[in-house]
Amino acid sequence: HGQRPKLAEGIALAAKSSAATILVQPHLLFQGLVYQEIAAAIEQAARESTKEWRLAAPLGPDPEIARTVLELAAPWLKE
């Protein structure tokens, strides 16, 4: 949980940008609590801004993503 920027910080940075439209692409595999929190934060930002805010769908299940995760985890997996 030490990643930066935090959600609120990222939204604040985007809100200060010169862009008229902000697209938020969560790198999540499915909808759940985290996605809902992002959606609520985007809805709040849209109410407080003249910008157009868009929230993309989660990445979803994809064989390439699964393969990449397994490759990254391979050094720690026991056969």
Image (cartoon, rainbow, N blue to C red):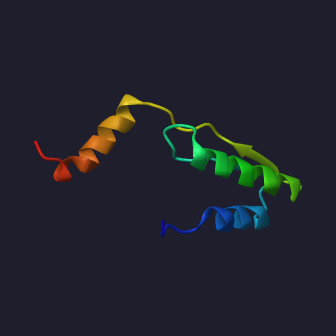
Give me the residue at 27% from left, 49% from top: 72
Give 55 or 36, whichever is nearer the viewer: 36
Q: Quadrant of residue 63?
A: top left
Give 31 or 45, whichever is nearer the viewer: 31
Give me the residue at 58% from left, 49% from top: 34
Residue 9 sits above or below residue 34 on the image: below
Residue 61 sits above or below residue 17 on the image: above
Q: Quadrant of residue 44?
A: bottom right
As drawn, which residue projects farthest toward the front? 33
Residue 62 sits above or below residue 79 on the image: above
**Left or right, residue 43 beside residue 39:** right
Q: Position of residue 18 (x, y in %)?
A: 79, 62
As drawn, which residue projects farthest toward the left? 79
Q: Position of residue 67 (x, y in %)?
A: 30, 36
Residue 77 sits above or below residue 18 on the image: above
**Left or right, residue 11 beside residue 26:** right
Give me the residue at 70% from left, 67% from top: 13
Give me the residue at 65% from left, 45% from top: 36
**Left or right, residue 5 beside residue 44:** left
